[in-house]
Amino acid sequence: MSWRRPSSLALGLAFLASLSAAANIEVTVGKDSKLEFVPASIKAQIGDTITYKFFSKNHAVAQSTFADPCHIQDNGIFSGFTPNTSPDTAAPTDFTITVNDTKPLWFYCPQTNGNHCQSGMVHAINAPDTGNTFDAYKAKAQQASTPSTPPAGTLPVGGLRKLHIDVGFNGQLMFNPNNVTELVGTVVEFSYNPMNHSIVQSSFDKPCQPIDREGGGFVAPFVPTMQTPSGVTFEVTLTNGDPIWFYCAQTKKSHCQSGMVGSINAATTGDKTFQAFKDLASKAPPSTTGADSPLVGALKVNGTFIGDLGSTVLDTTTLDPSLGSNIPPPNMTYPPYIGGMAGGNQPANYNWGDNITDEAVAVLQALQYIDNFIVALLLEGYNQMSQGQWANVYPGSITQTLGSLVAQSLIHRRTYTDSLQHFGKDVVGQCAKYDTTAALQDVDTWLETVLAGLHLSIGATLDALSALAVSDPWTTPALATGLGSQARMSALVNMMQNHVAAAAPREVLIPTALATSYIAAHYAQDSSCAPPSKDAKTFPALVIKDKTIQPDTNRVTAITVEIPDGAKGGLFIAWLGPWGGLSYTSVDATTSTAAVPSTLSGHVWAVLTNKDGVKADDLDTVTVAGPEIMWVSQQWSVSDF
């Protein structure tokens, strides 16, 4: 009887693949005053999100069964009604659902004033092409009984209803919109714009002052920024229908007193309307902002949650890629949001020894040299993902995770720079300009380059741990404790590339000298990018011209390499596999082809050498070109999934 591996791994890969490729599909509801969804019928994959944008006059999205259109099904999705007077400008509130399977989903607008559903205002996701088709659903809706359900006032369920408020809209001292009526359960998202604003909840009676009540109210920090969009948002969820009053606490130009106030669910008549609040604010004393923020709500930077600033100001200049060239002294921390993204800051105590050996200095400088490149690469690519040309390529959860990788890499680098500075040794200056044009040509190439950088750092750190364990034992915990997060991140990128997360039982050790050579050979543009050691060698990049792949397993069985000019004698490929797995195969003198050992799995490093049998510690003494990373195979065939 044949045995197959259980499908949990396959499901995990499929889930990651669906997330990586997930799309957001926008559907307009009632645009141009037409009773229609556009597009009316769509195809969506697992993980895709559908966002509904509402236009005049007052529409909603409700889920029914195919058999009973115009009436909400048990536990059906419902957006809540969303009034809007404009036929061509979407309401500030939208509604987003996530597709969890590919079964047909049937929707309609339940507005009874004009019987929208019965008038053909219906919508479908993944409707069959035959049988219960979209057209058949629409025809049934036109014959459906009235009234449609649910009625106005029903709360949203089954998706994310979000009200978007611009802070400092169009350079003005205002929230836009500044006076809205919303349903319980709605998430209110404030988006920061230039120049320097905050968001603070007040009472009606004391505008421009934080609300004085048990538990307080929401407080979001000042965010000095000149970027639109800034990437900084603050979210609060409406838990009841009580009126909410808020303001900007910026005292320069007296923002609150100048009318930068807002309300949610304020009365439309009487003595506590939005206009009455605004008039009262114009006479208020100077604004205050209260305790450190954020409080009550959720502060996010490019989708990454920031738990605690320890301050009333979020310095968004830290989003600048130039952060990579700034090396703080040991007693100074990064801006709090970096620690929030990373999940923590550098250690409070490295337990440094009384001294540091010259070998440890050289090793730490080499590791910093590698991480300088990784940090620069991550910052540039992450900016493209969060607010540049790659925005929305991946869902927010993936972008957030990669944002954590950026922040963690900055924290990891502090291990080297803090230690070097503590002992009065030189840190490594940042390269003036890496040649990353090819690496940044698209997001997939960037991810491949990031993965190579992570493997370089992991492999060189393992080499450093072996070299310094006896002479500088304090380095062991300082270096080893950073390996876990890097390994987890490389596993994530593996899965995004449809590989298993962990294709080998151990990480690959790569000699530090070869790791720095890899950076120099591939990305150095001038002398500022050279390895820190004066004795460091830079070997030519190993060019793999072709790979022989076994069709049934997708295993790479041989490679053909480019032989550098001047290389003489017998040549070999040194294969650096999981720790303890160094092996050699000869390079055919005629075809320049070398076999790949069948015992290797996952990512390995290939080095062209002029001698075989040399230990890893001495590999740089026989290297002709390389190293170069490549994916060999994984322990489970894709066909098994």
Image (cartoon, helix red, strand yellow):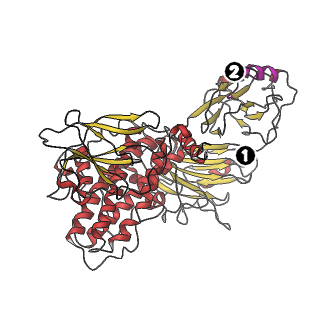
- Relative horizontal placement of residue 293, taking residue 79 as reference (left or right): left
Measured along the vertical axis of the image, is residue 31 above or below residue 494?
Answer: above
Determine whether the residue tagged by mark 1 lies in a helix, strand or loop.
loop
Q: Do the residues labelled 1 and 2 touch (CB within 8 Å)?
A: no
Residue 365 percent across, percent down from the top left: 25, 62
In the image, 325 versus 232, the foreground residue is 325
- Residue at the farthest bottom position: 354
Residue 292 percent across, percent down from the top left: 52, 65
In the image, 389 versus 258, the foreground residue is 389
- Relative horizontal placement of residue 107, taking residue 3 as reference (left or right): right
The residue that disc 1 covers is 183
Q: Give the range drawn in magenta.
A: 125-140
- Please state, as top left, top right, bottom left or bottom right, where the N terminus lies in the image: top right
Q: How crowded is mark 1: few (under 14 residues within 10 Å), some or many (20 or more)?
A: many
Measured along the vertical axis of the image, is residue 460 above or below residue 302?
Answer: below
In the image, 473 versus 558, the foreground residue is 558
Q: Does the segment drawn in magenta span residue 448?
A: no
> As shown in the figure, which amino acid type bears the numbered disc 1?
Leu
- Please state, as top left, top right, bottom left or bottom right, where the C terminus lies in the image: top right
> As shown in the figure, which amino acid type bears the numbered disc 2?
Asp
In the image, 155 versus 92, the foreground residue is 155
Determine whether the residue tagged by mark 2 lies in a helix, strand or loop.
loop
The residue that disc 2 covers is 129
